Amino acid sequence: MPIIEATGLARTFKARKKEVHAVRGVDLAVEEGEIVGFLGPNGAGKTTTLRMLTTLLRPTAGTAVIAGADLLRDPVGVRRRIGFVPQAIGQTMGGTDNQAKVIEELHDQAALYHIGKAEGAQRAELLLNQLDLAGLDDRLVKTLSGGQRRRLEIALGLVHEPPVVFLDEPTTGLDPQSRSNLWDHIRKLRSDLGTTVFLTTHYLEEADALCDRVIIIDHGVTVATGTPDELKRQVSGDVVTLQVSGPVADARALLAQQPIVRDATVSDGELRLTVDRGEESLPALLRVFDGAGLAIRSISLSRPTLDDVFLTLTGRSLRDDSPSSARNGDDHDPAPAATASSAASKELAPDVFLH
């Protein structure tokens, strides 16, 4: 059974006397131990869906079960079972207190989940070691680098040992080295702790490098699900580009008849072939050329990117949606983003939902 499963999840609200459908019916399933990327252009419903899954926003329709707890019937149970690390909105905002010490933040977070002092201290020490924060116990949060601060925020989301953690734009604003370092730590959440990771990102290379599967949302509905490689092949296929000695039109006519070739075109004197699996198709193509006595002057293989997938499915490039615009909210929902600490403080609150 999936550890996260949502069916028909929807959210509508009133804006300027008009009903807005922020999310129209999202279906998704995440298996235990997966790292899944949730992608969507600005306004697609990505943030609203994340807020619903983390109990910060009540769904208008649909159902969801997270780590065995029903989202609508048992939101407090959901909160006990999940960690949530929100977007880092600048250096002075987010889930941490600038004037507090690192160790104080972790102890306070443990207390919010009613974890005893001794056990809380043990978990804090373990997380500091696992997230490369050892030796920073007595440092003020405001003195941490961007990467250290993001790792601390992840530690806050993990202090109660949830089986599922939601990471909202975890590396936005980090330099490439810090981003790569954080990727390694996110992988370790799964490999070392067995944590299921559900993350949103505006960096396609991040989804490609980290995620076992990708879920793409557009106009409030799920439009595609699969591994990055599966989605690339379904949408675009691999492209083999050749330069041949002799009439290129003859080579195109010959290769267009091959079952492994989805499309064959000539552009600027080059032959471009679309195939499903380029690495497997190349030997077969070479055999066809050899059998026909045609000589190849050059050959190259290129693979589609997730941006190609995005462009095909949504008509927009995800790279057009800057992280800065994402920080301002990719949906039109008025609900404020919660911080890691505030989410925890609401975890055992009597309110069913914040909004």
Image: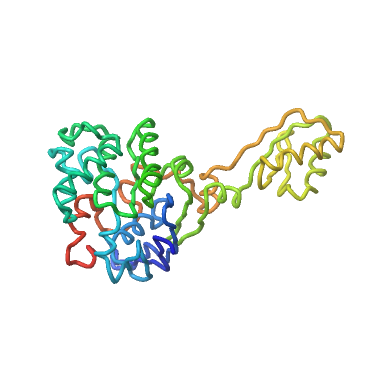
Where does residue 112 sit, x and y in percent of width and height? 16, 54
Where does residue 60 sit, x and y in percent of width and height? 33, 70
Q: Is residue 104 above or below residue 135?
A: below
Where does residue 57 sit, x and y in percent of width and height? 28, 62
* Image point (70%, 39%), residue name: 272
* Image point (36%, 66%), residue name: 65
Q: Is residue 119 above or below residue 172?
A: below
Quadrant of residue 179 within the rendered picture: top left
Q: Is residue 327 above or below residue 26?
A: above
Quadrant of residue 56 within the rendered picture: bottom left
In the image: residue 185, left or right of residue 222: left
For the N terminus, which image quadrant?
Answer: bottom left
In the image: residue 153, left or right of residue 280: left
Quadrant of residue 7 within the rendered picture: bottom left
Q: Nearer the viewer, residue 338 or 251?
A: 338
Where does residue 224 sit, x and y in percent of width and height? 51, 57
